[in-house]
Image (cartoon, coloured by chain):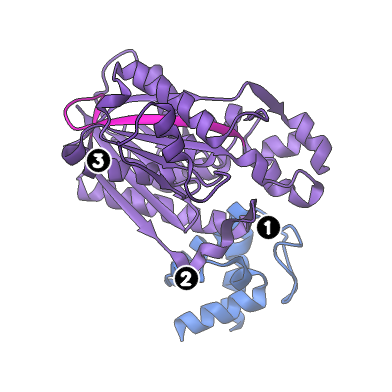
Chain colours: A purple, B blue
Amino acid sequence: MAFLRAFGSHLPARRVGNDELAALTGVTPEWILNVSGISERRFAADDETVASLGLAAARNCLEKAAVAPESLGMILVASGSAPRFTPGAASQIAAELGLTETPALDIPVASAGSLIGLTLASQLAPKVGPVLVIGAETMSRAVDRTPEGKDTAILFGDGAGACLVDPDSGLVRIADFTLHTDGSASEILKLEAGRIHMQGLNVILQASRKIPRAIKTLLERNSLAPDAPAVYLMHQANLNLIKRVADTLKVPHERFFTNLERYGNTSAASLLIAADEWFAAQTKPVSAPLVFAAFGTGLNWGALLALPA
Amino acid sequence: MMESHARVLSVLRSVTGKAEADPGEDESLFSSGILDSFALADFVSGLEEEFGVTVPDSDLSARKFDTLRKVDAYIAAKQG
């Protein structure tokens, strides 16, 4: 058994509004808001990295859980924008936490990486002890802020989130998950030579079918109706996509937590940042199921069901 | 084929809310502004419902649904 015990997050201080990006990409601030639902995003400072953002989120999470780094059985770091492929940010974050023997592994899957991390942690935690899952990204450095690159430049922001997956106790219990990979469409969304390449039409088409299907699979095999979850915590890719998933499931839009209006698409970090904010706003213990869902490079996608602890 | 074409056009008009849309056979539905990314997803779902076919994930490419001629051919092949 495994539980989601605590969440944490860290956002860079610099806020970037639509007016600033509109001037660079040749569109209007209103157009950006209309096509993405994003009002502003955060950009990392020059001295901030995937590892430093991830470390700050990790410390925030461990502090909330009142857990010392030495208690961790493993660290998993999801990122599609780490500047170095290997070694990635995981070993650096572990070292900064003072850990020199604890396994620390990278999951180089943009957008869906933190969901994959949670699912792996749910299986590993009973064996190795508490697993710290981190999603950290500096996607603002992977976009082309010119008119040619407007479709991606307007979407992405930087940030990090973290979750402690514990084998013994927590806020909610991980009950089930479903993960999928379809490499036949991997070219429609990729990071190459430090740049993100996205075929928007095809990504939306794939995501708008794959995400609801994964959620339905998960709910049906757990005998739950789509309106049973208290909240859907989804990768914050695009407000219109989130609404479409809600419509497909016939669930009110309000049931899907969103914060991309303020942070944009922070890729693998977004799911954990959203979860941190949602749990922080709860005044009572969770009493209904929760669903996490994500879609990203690979293509990788899936959903995770958590039940009251 | 003519009846099928009319049904495709009807689905297109329904999902886009553009009742007057009348693109040429080879006119790009995207370049012309008739379809955007979210309307494309609705269009594909609408075609599945209208024609009782299933569009597999491997066919989820905007290129396959770019013009009415391509859509007509795709539906004909699926119903083959």
Left or right, B51 with respect to A194, comes to: left
User: Is residue A169 inside the magenta stretch?
Assistant: yes
Q: Of residues A250 and B13, which is closer to you in this image?
A: A250
Badge nearest the viewer, 2 or 3 = 3
Task: Please tell me which residue is depicted at 46% across the width and 87% down the height of the picture.
Answer: B80
Label 3 is found on which chain of the structure? Answer: A
Query: Is A67 placed above or below A131 here?
Result: above
Q: Looking at the picture, do discs 2 and 3 lie on one chain?
A: no
For the stretch drawn in magenta, the main secondary structure is strand
Q: Of residues B35 and A283, which is closer to you in this image?
A: A283
Badge nearest the viewer, 1 or 2 = 2
Q: Can you give x and y, in whole percent of width and height, for residue A225 in the image? A: 27, 42
Badge nearest the viewer, 1 or 3 = 3
Q: Of residues A124 and A174, which is closer to you in this image?
A: A124
Q: Estimate the spatial distance between the alpha carbons at disc 2 and disc 3, rounded to whole Å.
A: 31 Å
Looking at the image, the residue that sits furthest to the top is A283
Label 2 is found on which chain of the structure? Answer: B
Residue to which mark 3 is pinned: A122
Task: Please tell me which residue is depicted at 39% across the width and 46% down the height of the picture.
Answer: A249
Q: Looking at the picture, do discs 1 and 2 lie on one chain?
A: yes
* Dot 3: element: helix
Residue to which mark 2 is pinned: B58
Residue A255 in view (yes/no): no
Q: Amino acid type of disc 1?
A: Ala
Q: Estimate the spatial distance between the alpha carbons at disc 1 and disc 2, rounded to whole Å.
A: 30 Å
Q: Can you give x and y, in whole percent of width and height, for residue B37 in the image? A: 62, 55
Residue to which mark 1 is pinned: B19
Write down the region rendered in magenta: A157-173
